[in-house]
Image (cartoon, coloured by chain):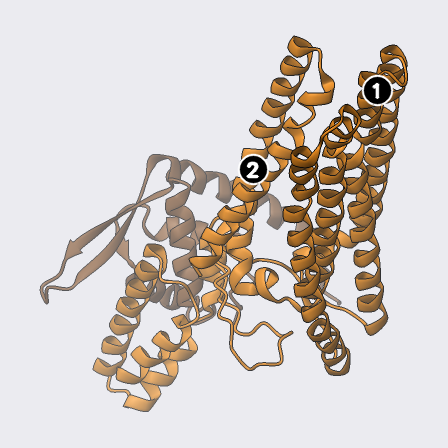
Chain colours: A orange, B brown
Amino acid sequence: METIISYIESLFKNYPDTPEIRRARTELLNVMEDKYNELKSQGKSENEVIGIVISEFGNIDEIAAELNIVEKTDRIIGSNDNISNNINNSIVDENEIDMRPVVSVTSSQAEEFIQKRIHFGNMIALGVFLCIISPTAYIILDELSDIGIISSALADSVGMMSLFVVISIAVSILIFNAISNEKYEHYEKEKIILDYSTKKEIEEQAGTFRSVFGFKITVGVVLCILGVIPAGVLDEIAKTDFMQSVADMSAVFILIAVAVGVSLFITAGMRRDAYNIILNKEEYSIKKTINRKKSERIIGIIAVIYWPLTLVIYIVWSFLSLDFGVSWIVWPIAGIIFGSVAATIKLIYNKSV
Amino acid sequence: MISSDGLRGYNDMIILNIIFNKPSYGYEISRTIKERTSDKYVIKETTLYSAFTRLEKNGYIDSFYGNETNGKRRTYYQITESGKTYYREKCKEWELIKEVVELFKEEYI
């Protein structure tokens, strides 16, 4: 009987431990035991009985199909380390499990993906850059009209126009590229298999890029911080009215510095993402995908509430103060707050790995 | 000897027939099938168990634990009213199938 028990245990080994499975196992063991005892009482030999009992047992898959349960799959190919990733594919909420399909990617496909991603990053950076500096012309013109060089009517109209023109160009770039990039998005949702040489090559590229990444981020941060300095300095040393106006225009410096800094963040980040996606590393790795999905879901929910709210605040403030030249500041501030919140959420979830 | 596959769709009917008048348990049911068909149909235990699960899910049978002398808890299955209705429908279906298939059975093939 021991043999039969071990046999049945081994068949159930790869199935998840749910109440239904446990009940099935117990029932089947009972039936097999009954059969064993009766055949033995008929005088058959131990071996004969075991043979009959096992041959009449059947296939666990039948039961699993009935209970809608699937075997654990053993190994996810695609990483050169020999860790066996035991992914439990059973009846659980998809957001709890990494159920991404496994996909084989050729060397040229991988290259193409990376190039397109980098280009996408550059375009997004451009769009955001334009968004950030869009009020520049308006600010300068506004100042000039304050000093009296041009009429305020001219300043307002041309200024507003330039603002909206630049923003529409920026938004078109962002939308167009987001759509063009859609066909490469599937890589984010797959476990990628690469052949050994391609993988090594890309890992090398990613390695060399790591230092460039650090450099870009550092420069970006420095720019954002230093961008404020001209404004402060000029304000202090402004002696004449003209100088004072120049000082007031230094908001422009801040905008440009921040715009360049943010572009650096974006391009560096996108390229790092490209490598991580194709190599299934960091937040695209199996372990972290689940956390990433959770954090992305939460961030998505926050965004849906946050941005419309910000828009309302902006519009109300703008029309109450009738000073678009000031209320625009809502957007960069909102962006920074949102970015920090999103980053914090991701950090919290990634820590819980 | 028929494979479990051959009678797919009629395992339910077979089980319901056996427990129509009196509840029974797993091994007794599988043994009855084997003996009544004189070994022509030996049902696999997993097939049987899946059938029990399915029948119970659809409300055609109920299960309960009987207390055996040796203290082991054995699962008994008994038919329900809707189970009896389902059984009769299956019998009619089988008559129909027999009639149809017979039209394509020739002696000389």
**Residue A134 % position (x, y):** 80, 32
Mark 2, other Cα within 10 Å: few <14 / some 14–19 / many ≥20: few
**Residue B73 % position (x, y):** 17, 60
Quick one: A144 or A127, which is closer to the camera?
Answer: A144
- The chain identifier of the residue carrying mark 1 reads A
From the viewer's perspective, is the residue at label 1 or at label 2 nearer? 1
Mark count: 2
Secondary structure under the numbered disc 1 in the rendered image: helix
User: Is residue A162 something one can see in this rendering?
Assistant: yes
Residue identifier under label 2: A337
Q: In screen coordinates, is A7 left or right of A329? A: left
**Residue A326 % position (x, y):** 68, 22
Residue drawn 13% across and 61% down? B68
A29 vs A149: above or below? below
The quarter of the picture where residue B86 lies is top left
Q: In screen coordinates, is A216 left or right of A35? A: right
Quick one: A99 or A143, which is closer to the camera?
Answer: A143
- Residue A144 is labelled as none
Quarter in which the C terminus of chain B is drawn: bottom right
Mark 1, other Cα within 10 Å: few <14 / some 14–19 / many ≥20: some
Residue identifier under label 1: A160
**Residue A33 % position (x, y):** 26, 73
Secondary structure under the numbered disc 2 in the rendered image: helix
Residue drawn 26% across and 83% down? A2
The quarter of the picture where residue A39 lies is bottom left
Residue drawn 63% across and 15% down? A317
- The chain identifier of the residue carrying mark 2 reads A
